[in-house]
Amino acid sequence: MKLGFAVLLVFVGGALGAIAREFLMLFVPTLSHRFPLDILVANVVASLLIGVSTARHNRKAITDGWHLMVTTGVMGGLSTFSSFAYATSVLMKASMASALVAAAYVLISLVMGYVAVIAGMKIGGHDH
Amino acid sequence: MLVGLGGGLGSALRWGIGRLVGEGYKGDFPLGTFLINVSGSLVIGYLSVLFNVDWDNRYGHGMVLNALVITGVLGGYTTFSSMQLDAARLAAQQRTHLAAIYLSLSVAAGLLAALAGAALASAQG
């Protein structure tokens, strides 16, 4: 694969993923206590799907090009670490109560994201 | 549309940096994603204060810069799903300790970077 084409695939995938995340941010309500539910949903969904697409690619069910666009592009664009870290830092500084929300947010994100990747790889690892 | 443009640019940048780090470092620690996420966290902390982003009303001030740079470029550049995938891969190779260290270190360093970025922007007034 030519370098320019590979960059284009990642660019297009990343653009689609980021737009999907923007829609989640618009339509998923933020919970009381300012819990960032939208970013949690984006990160957990992307973790599930990155597991599926990686397992499909391992089984050679999708090509390298699709893998680059979907796994590196779309899932990387849909999920975000910077908003996750920044929202946590803002909550931590605000008050004692919101610092607890921040701790819960980090823990829930890490556990659900990890379980989602494992579940995605199981789903994608089956023969279809 | 701006989010898409930024997300595409950020993702391409992530891929490029990931490849560069992968060429220079051959260890087991997922260094590329780690460096990407920590540097992205530093920049988001800095720019959020600089752009005066009200985190409860992300669609208020400076919408264009917000959509393009923060939601788009930085969101596309950093990745949560690849981090979890890296961790799951390490765990599958019986490197559970390294996976746990990687996740905790990413969160701790990312958090500190976001705080440092915000403090830097505040100090500049």
Image: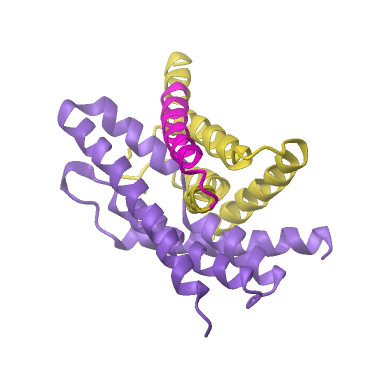
Chain colours: A purple, B yellow
Relative vertical location of residue B125 with respect to residue A24 in this rendering, above or below: above
User: Could you say which quadrant of the image residue A69 lies in?
Assistant: bottom right
Q: Which of B60 and A100 is in front in this view?
A: A100
Asked whether residue B56 appears in the rendered view, the answer is no
Q: Give the range drawn in magenta.
A: B93-116
Q: Which of B23 and B74 is in front in this view?
A: B23
Query: In the picture provided, is B14 more to the left or to the right than A105?
Result: right
Q: Which residue is outermost to the front?
A: B94
Q: Where in the figure is residue A103, as x and y percent of width and height?
A: 26, 36
Would you say residue B107 sits in the magenta stretch? yes
Q: Where in the figure is residue B1, as x and y percent of width and height?
A: 54, 61
| Residue positioned 45% across, 39% down in the render | B103
Q: Where in the figure is residue A54, as x and y percent of width and height?
A: 57, 65
| Residue positioned 72% across, 36% down in the render | B25
Relative vertical location of residue B108 with respect to residue B91 in this rendering, above or below: above
Query: In the picture provided, is A15 more to the left or to the right than A82?
Result: right
| Residue positioned 66% across, 63% down in the render | A68
Query: In the picture provided, is A24 more to the left or to the right than A92?
Result: right
Label count reads 0
User: Does the magenta stretch mainly form a helix, a strand or a loop?
Assistant: helix
Quarter of the N terminus of chain A within the rendering: bottom right
Q: Nearer the viewer, residue B40 or B107?
A: B107
Q: Which residue is outermost to the right?
A: A2
Q: Which residue is outermost to the top?
A: B123
Asked whether residue A126 appears in the rendered view, the answer is yes
| Residue positioned 64% across, 51% down in the render | B9
Q: Which of B119 and B87 is in front in this view?
A: B87
Would you say residue B40 sits in the magenta stretch? no
